[in-house]
Amino acid sequence: MPFVNIKMVKSDKGPEAKKQLIKGVTKLLQDIYGKPPEFCHVVIEEIEPDSWGLGGQSVAERRG
């Protein structure tokens, strides 16, 4: 039973983008590892831009 946890900075893409991401990751697990979709768990964790750091700055700072 694969469990994929995707951590990413919150974006304005909306729920449709998340739906496509979940579907795509599930398909990869099915195609590459032969896992049945009903056993594939995909979790998306969205992190606030001021809580994610890169190069000594928060993503919020880098975005300006």
Image (cartoon, rainbow, N blue to C red):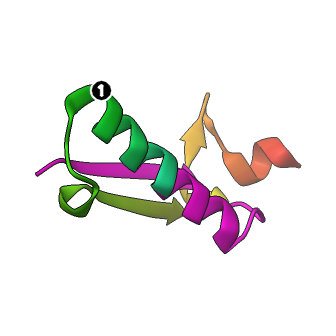
Q: Going by the picture, which residue comes out furthest to the right?
A: 64
State the image coordinates of residue 37 (x, y, percent, origin top left).
Answer: 28, 55
State the image coordinates of residue 42 (x, y, percent, origin top left).
Answer: 34, 58
State the image coordinates of residue 38 (x, y, percent, origin top left).
Answer: 23, 63
Residue 5 belongs to the span the image colors magenta: yes
Q: Is 45 situated left or right of 52 in this image?
A: left
The amino acid on which the numbered mark 1 sits, given as a three-letter code, is: Ile
Q: Is 21 situated left or right of 39 in this image?
A: right
Towards the viewer: 11 or 26: 26
For disc 1, the marked residue is 32
Position of 34 relative to 21 (above/below): above
Towards the viewer: 42 or 47: 42
Magenta stretch bounds: 1-22
SS at mark 1? helix
Quadrant of the image occupied by residue 34: top left
Residue for point 39% across, 36% down: 28
